[in-house]
Amino acid sequence: MTQFDVHQNRNEATKSRYPLLLDVQSDLLDPLVTRVVIPMVPATTARTRSMETLTPALKVGGKSFVLMTPQVAAISQRELGPAVGNFAEHRTRILAALDMLITGI
């Protein structure tokens, strides 16, 4: 697993609502059977007030998705489908979203 990879969601119960999951866990923790992810929703269906720092919109395959940072979760690695992109270039924005969630700034 690679930090900042965007994966398809394999979980039957949640994949229609959250089709993509952003892996934010450090690669140093690969031996764990879980990964910390941020669910992603298509920007057209996002039901959140615009809080660009907390819930930034990023593009995958030319489509805009919103990071639902307040819904960050640890899931089993087997719920991660194939990687469809990597957001390492957006590291600063992703960490700012997590920082906003945790510290409020």
Image (cartoon, rainbow, N blue to C red):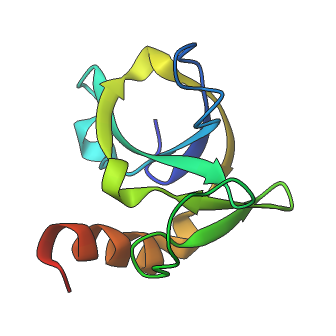
Total labels: the figure holds 0
Q: Position of residue 24 (x, y in %)?
A: 38, 51
Foreground of the two, 47 or 11: 47
Residue 41 relative to residue 70: left or right: right
Residue 60 relative to residue 41: left or right: right
Within the image, what quadrant is residue 103 found in?
A: bottom left
Does residue 26 sit above or below 91 in this rendering? above
Residue at x-position 25% and y-position 25%: 31
Does residue 4 sit above or below 91 in this rendering? above
Within the image, what quadrant is residue 87 found in?
A: bottom right
Q: Position of residue 35 (x, y in %)?
A: 33, 33
In the rendered image, the residue lying farthest to the bottom is 105
Foreground of the two, 34 or 53: 53
Does residue 49 sit above or below 14 in this rendering? below
Residue at x-position 58% and y-position 37%: 18
Residue 50 relative to residue 86: left or right: left
Does residue 99 sit above or below 34 in this rendering? below
Foreground of the two, 18 or 30: 18
Residue 65 relative to residue 12: left or right: right
Residue at x-position 20% and y-position 86%: 105
Q: Position of residue 63 (x, y in %)?
A: 82, 59
Residue at x-position 83% and y-position 54%: 61
Q: Position of residue 89 (x, y in %)?
A: 58, 73
In the rendered image, the residue lying farthest to the left is 103
